[in-house]
Image (tube, rainbow, N blue to C red):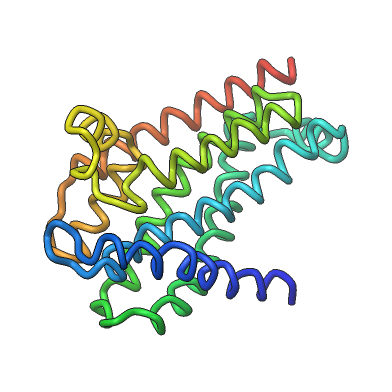
Amino acid sequence: MTTVSFMVMLPLLLHIGITMVMKNIVVQSIDQVPYDVWVFPGIILLIASVSTFSLIYRDLFDLRIHKKSFIPITLAPYGKTHLVIGFLVTSIIESLVYVIVAMGVLTVLLPEPLNWSAYFIVPLFTLLYTFLLGNLIITFSVLTDRISTYLSITISMFLFILFATGVLVEFDFYPKTIGTLLSYFPLSMILSDLRGILFFNRVEWGPIMIPVATALGWTWLNGYMLKRKLKQ
């Protein structure tokens, strides 16, 4: 019941704290999309970020530094890359549950309904987004041994996601050079392409394939770093 309550309350809190405030500042996007609707995909992926972090923190960082069940897991007859994939798969599945609940809650609050296809497209992009973000969190979890350092890095990561990946405002609001650089960040590319599909029926394969290739290579790299860290 606690988890279900959190799943319902989190999108409500983000809607009150972000959408209801920001829509009085940014009424419409540059392409004339109402801010409430424009920010919807960003809020959904922000919720996916929270759920991804909580699961990987528990399974990969907390269990490792407190020497609980993590070491016996790593001694199983599977490669370290397979273990990393296992962590990613479980985090993706849990994030999808959070996202589906959040979409149901936020849909009630939207000023105008989204196209029915959005409820299939957003979970697909959530899968890709979680695949990439999960690798980033796994890297932090493998390389960091101090809780204070880990929490500082994590807070910085969430601030970056909130303010530098297009969750709150478009990159056109940033100075031109900074906005251009931020738009090429893989997480930003996923969110930008998602909005392009939802609002303009525009698909750009580059912003999809680059994050996919990055996430695949990063998964192998995380498996290698985990093997070196554990000296197994």
Residue appearing at x 32%, y 42% in the figure? 188
How far across and down, in percent of the image, does residue 78 sit?
67, 34
Identify which residue, 81 or 155, lies in the foreground. Answer: 155
Residue appearing at x 20%, y 65% in the figure? 28
Position of 208 compared to 44: left or right? left
The mark total stands at: 0
How far across and down, in percent of the image, does residue 217 sit?
42, 28
134 w.r.t. 121: above or below = above
Q: Which image quadrant is residue 36 in?
A: bottom left
Q: Image quadrant for the C terminus?
A: top right
Q: Image quadrant for the N terminus?
A: bottom right
Residue appearing at x 70%, y 18% in the figure? 229
How far across and down, in percent of the image, does residue 153 sit?
60, 31
10 w.r.t. 220: above or below = below
Identify which residue, 50 or 29, lies in the foreground. Answer: 29
Q: Which image quadrant is residue 115 in?
A: bottom left
Residue appearing at x 49%, y 41% in the figure? 159
15 w.r.t. 48: above or below = below
Identify which residue, 177 or 207, lies in the foreground. Answer: 177
Position of 161 compared to 139: left or right? left
